[in-house]
Image (cartoon, helix red, strand yellow):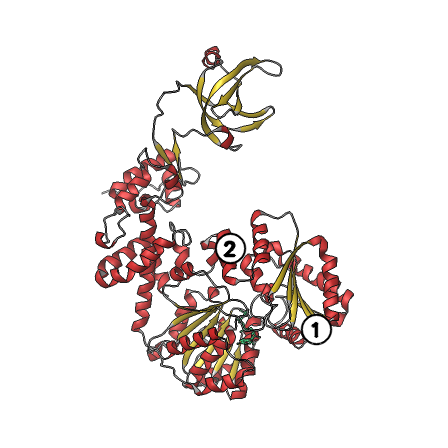
């Protein structure tokens, strides 16, 4: 018997649909219109932009054939608001000219352009109307589609898929907010809206049908995070309790803790005493004193006889933590080990052995510390700075560290990018969140000034003056990945220029290409006050702490993101001296560039900065690296849909408790394979 013919590979529009991931009926059902074409919508001319295709109605005020350059019919039309446009026809029939006689009322559809003699439309569609001709009403969906996928084809495919898509109601109606329609009805409506619906509510996604869809998605996200938290509650962690070392550290510190530090310290101590692994996010503005809180947590863990690991995303940052922690903890007899990629050979082996035997009580390093090679005798607590870069894979690796003993370490993540409450609620439904909302006393606010690059020489004079007064300054040069080489040259050139002006031995240079020891040596000279000026690339972005530095210049500030500018600026204003941050920009500025610099000039509050950043960029981009949570949201917007998020957050635990099967089916339908990502 001949073989059955192989299925024909998809071609043409079907291929194009597959490329968009539109494979199953449910995929098509969830492929929603970008906008709708409204055959009935009339746009007053004064509201239309050039390049836009519009429909309007007007009365012919003149009509003549021009023959000077080429033969063409020119018809001038005025709309009801008194605005005019010229219609131009290069080929025309005499009957057309008659149809568009002076005084005739026409409905015209075409692209508005800016012509030689003002606004014009070339070869528009024209229909004569009586003032009372009813407009045919229908909203035609316009879908996102790539090349080779005609709208008509896609519309047909979606219409055919809708009845077959599994859209049965999974959620008990009694638990749903009453304003939301059933899911199937909502989707049918979004694909084929009733003609009398307000287009605005459809297009700004505030219509109840849209709300239902966003609610579904937010609920799935909440459920999945709660499930991962519940899973953690089934795991066991070492119970860490200890106060003696904490008390000794507090007695040795040169300052009193702030109220916020004390409160957060207690929250963390309560976590550590739990027999289940806790994941907590410690967020606090730049300079709010997170490191000492981390040190206190480490003390509890070490006092209880367990090891603690502290990890930072870069060596420079890890090194900064190390210096502080060694300064605080070694005098108390704590044994600290330093493990990074640049520690090699015999020394590295010795340190690895100390971690493996338990001799090292605190291990500080980059994220390399949780790589499989570093073994711990008994890791009780992992502290991770800048959690955005601590992804799912790392969390899983951490879990494996103690797996053979059936125990999982506690995890404390620190972030200097505080995020607004609504975002935190959604993003971190699986985490506990502590916030340091108080700065240590005695800080003077930072004054931020924005200048055009033309003022550069004046700024340099100002620096020379500050140096004369015994103050320290940073000069930050941008580093952009695509052209690292040339940016590096810029930093080196700026360094040479300033060194020549101010003295060779007074200006340091710090950039990413330097060896770790070289970087550490320059930092040490700057920290000790020996170097009054440090020219640096963004390697100093996070964690660098030199309280005596009181002036920062950021060159080409327009190239930086808002959160990054705030981080950089946070390197000054850490002592009691009044500090200044100068943002030098090279215009002309883009809209968002101007917004960013304005925000920096107007506020130093990290939460406000985060809010503005969100407004400028939107949450997807804002959260960047984390692979779960908001990145997975297709329909909902965490800021705009905060009320829905609150409702979803309230419903999720009820659903899990009362209807676990429905909850599971819901997560599966919405997240499918992606649910795994969120479990970590
Ligand atoms: N309660 C306090 N009183 C006075 N100074 C404090 C207090 N807590 C911390 N400091 C000091 O404030 C400075 C900033 O602290 P730390 O480096 O921990 O901030 P941070 O929150 O990690 O900031 P960043 O995220 O910007 O690095 C340090 O010099 C630290 O010693």
For the image shown, how many numbered marks are present on the structure? 2
**Residue 676, percent from left and from top:** 34, 61
Q: Which residue is mark 2?
A: 612
Considering the image in quadrants, where does the C terminus appear? bottom left
Q: As rendered, which of 578 and 71 lies closer to the eye?
A: 578
Can residue 557 be seen? Answer: yes
Indicate the secondary structure of the residue bearing disc 1.
loop
Q: As rendered, which of 178 and 618 lies closer to the eye?
A: 178
**Residue 123, percent from left and from top:** 49, 22
Q: Quadrant of residue 572?
A: bottom right
**Residue 20, percent from left and from top:** 39, 45
Can residue 672 be seen? Answer: no
Indicate the secondary structure of the residue bearing disc 2.
helix
Residue 15 in the image: above or below residue 431: above
Q: As rendered, which of 31 and 354 lies closer to the eye?
A: 31
Residue 471 in the image: above or below residue 491: below
Q: Which residue is mark 1?
A: 531
**Residue 58, percent from left and from top:** 47, 22
Q: CA distance from mark 2 to mark 1?
A: 35 Å
CB under 8 Å between callouts 2 and 1?
no
In the visual, does 439 lie left or right of 169?
right
């Amino acid at each position: 018997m001949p073989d059955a013919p192989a299925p024909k590979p998809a071609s043409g529009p079907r291929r194009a649909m597959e490329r968009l991931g539109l494979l199953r009926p449910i995929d098509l059902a969830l492929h929603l219109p970008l906008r709708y074409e409204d055959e009935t919508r009339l746009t007053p001319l004064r509201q239309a932009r050039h390049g836009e295709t519009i429909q309007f109605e007007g009365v012919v005020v003149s009509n003549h054939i021009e023959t000077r350059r080429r033969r063409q019919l020119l018809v001038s039309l005025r709309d009801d608001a008194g605005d005019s446009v010229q219609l131009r026809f290069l080929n025309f029939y005499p009957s057309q000219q008659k149809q568009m006689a002076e005084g005739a009322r026409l409905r015209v559809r075409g692209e508005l352009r800016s012509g030689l003699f003002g606004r014009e439309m070339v070869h528009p569609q024209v229909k004569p109307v009586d003032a009372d001709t009813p407009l045919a009403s229908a909203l035609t969906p316009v879908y996102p589609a790539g090349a080779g996928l005609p709208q008509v084809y896609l519309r047909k495919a979606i219409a055919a898929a809708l009845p077959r898509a599994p859209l049965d109601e999974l959620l008990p109606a009694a638990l749903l907010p009453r304003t939301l329609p059933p899911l199937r009805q909502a989707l049918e409506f979004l694909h084929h809206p009733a003609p009398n619906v307000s287009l605005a509510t459809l297009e700004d996604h505030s219509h109840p049908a849209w709300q239902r869809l966003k609610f579904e998605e937010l609920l799935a996200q909440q459920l999945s995070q709660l499930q991962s938290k519940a899973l953690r509650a089934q795991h066991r962690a070492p119970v860490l309790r200890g106060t003696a070392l904490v008390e000794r550290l507090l007695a040795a510190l040169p300052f009193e803790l702030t109220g916020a530090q004390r409160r957060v310290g207690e929250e963390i101590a309560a976590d550590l005493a739990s027999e289940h692994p806790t994941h907590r996010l410690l967020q606090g503005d730049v300079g709010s004193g997170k490191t000492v809180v981390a040190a206190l947590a480490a003390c509890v863990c070490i006092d209880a006889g367990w090891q603690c690991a502290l990890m930072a995303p870069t060596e420079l940052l890890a090194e900064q933590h190390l210096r502080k922690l060694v300064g605080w903890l070694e005098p108390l007899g704590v044994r600290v080990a330093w493990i990074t990629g640049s520690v090699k050979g015999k020394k590295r082996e010795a340190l690895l052995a100390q971690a493996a035997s338990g001799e090292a009580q605190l291990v500080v390093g980059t994220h390399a510390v949780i790589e499989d090679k570093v073994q711990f005798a008994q890791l009780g607590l992992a502290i991770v700075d800048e959690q955005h870069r601590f992804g799912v894979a790392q969390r899983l690796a951490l879990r494996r560290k103690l797996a053979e003993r059936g125990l999982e370490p506690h995890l404390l993540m620190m972030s200097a990018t505080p995020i607004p409450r609504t975002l935190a609620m959604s993003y971190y439904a699986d985490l506990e969140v502590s916030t340091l909302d108080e700065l240590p006393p005695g800080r003077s606010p930072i004054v931020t000034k924005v200048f055009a690059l033309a003022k550069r020489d004046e700024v340099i004079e100002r620096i020379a003056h500050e140096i004369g007064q015994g103050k320290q300054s940073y000069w930050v040069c941008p580093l952009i990945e695509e052209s690292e080489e040339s940016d590096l040259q810029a930093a080196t050139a700026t360094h040479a220029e300033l060194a020549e002006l101010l003295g060779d031995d007074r200006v340091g240079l710090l950039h990413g290409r330097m060896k770790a020891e070289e970087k550490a040596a320059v930092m040490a000279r700057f920290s000790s006050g020996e170097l009054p000026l440090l020219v640096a690339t963004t390697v100093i972005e996070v964690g660098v702490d030199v309280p005596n530095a009181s002036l920062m210049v950021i060159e080409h500030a327009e190239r930086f993101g808002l959160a990054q500018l705030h981080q950089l600026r946070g390197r000054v204003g850490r002592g009691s001296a009044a500090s200044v941050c100068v943002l030098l920009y090279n215009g002309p500025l883009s809209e968002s560039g101007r917004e960013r610099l304005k925000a920096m000039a107007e506020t130093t509050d990290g939460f406000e900065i985060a809010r503005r950043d969100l407004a400028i960029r939107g949450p997807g981009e804002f959260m960047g690296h984390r692979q779960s949570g908001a990145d997975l949201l297709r329909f909902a917007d965490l800021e705009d849909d905060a009320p829905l998020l609150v409702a979803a957050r309230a419903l999720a635990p009820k659903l899990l408790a009362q209807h676990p099967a429905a909850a599971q089916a819901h997560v599966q339908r919405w997240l499918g394979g992606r649910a795994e990502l969120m479990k970590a």
